[in-house]
Amino acid sequence: MLDNRCHIKKDDKVKVTAGKDKGKVGKVLGIKRKSSRIIVENINMAKRHARPSAKHRQGGIIESEAPIHWSNVMLLCNKCVTPVRIKMKRLEDGKKIRVCRKCNEIIDS
């Protein structure tokens, strides 16, 4: 069975740790839980040839972000501005939040 738990959410800032875009920083645009992949802004750009259609009037070569595996990215902490691992913490009211392991700063807004 696949483990589809992910510590990354939409609109998080992440840094790529492996692959051709290693070292780049981007914002998460979407998450595909079934395939354990995420789409990051301006990371893993793929070119696709498209014929003219209603969606693409001109046609030609279209560049878009391709999904990458979420094990190849790390979350960026807002306070220490470095890629960090996170830990889950439960508040008094029972709500679970993400916390930076380096500086203990709350990541969830």
Image (tube, helix red, strand yellow):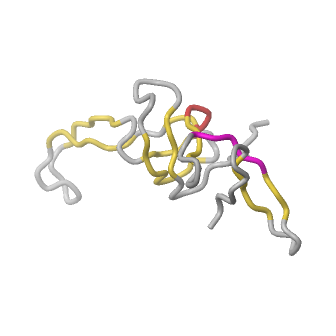
Q: Residue at x 65, y 58 (%)?
A: 107
Q: Quadrant of residue 9?
A: bottom right
Q: Nearer the viewer, residue 51 or 80?
A: 80
Is 7 displayed left or right of 10 in the figure? Answer: right
Q: Which secondary structure type mostly characterizes the magenta part of the structure?
A: strand
Q: Quadrant of the N terminus?
A: top right
Q: How many marks?
A: 0
Relative to 68, residue 56 above or below: below
Q: Residue at x 41, y 39 (%)?
A: 66
Residue 63 x, y percent position in the rendering: 26, 41
Q: Residue at x 53, y 44 (%)?
A: 38
Q: Residue at x 58, y 54 (%)?
A: 79
Is 44 displayed left or right of 102 in the figure? Answer: left
Q: Quadrant of the C terminus?
A: bottom right
Q: Quadrant of residue 43?
A: top left
Residue 2 x, y percent position in the rendering: 74, 37
Residue 58 x, y percent position in the rendering: 11, 51
Q: Nearer the viewer, residue 69 or 79?
A: 79
Q: Nearer the viewer, residue 109 or 58?
A: 109
Residue 87 x, y percent position in the rendering: 77, 48
The furthest residue to the left: 58
* Residue bounds of the magenta highlight: 83-87
Relative to 92, residue 7 above or below: above
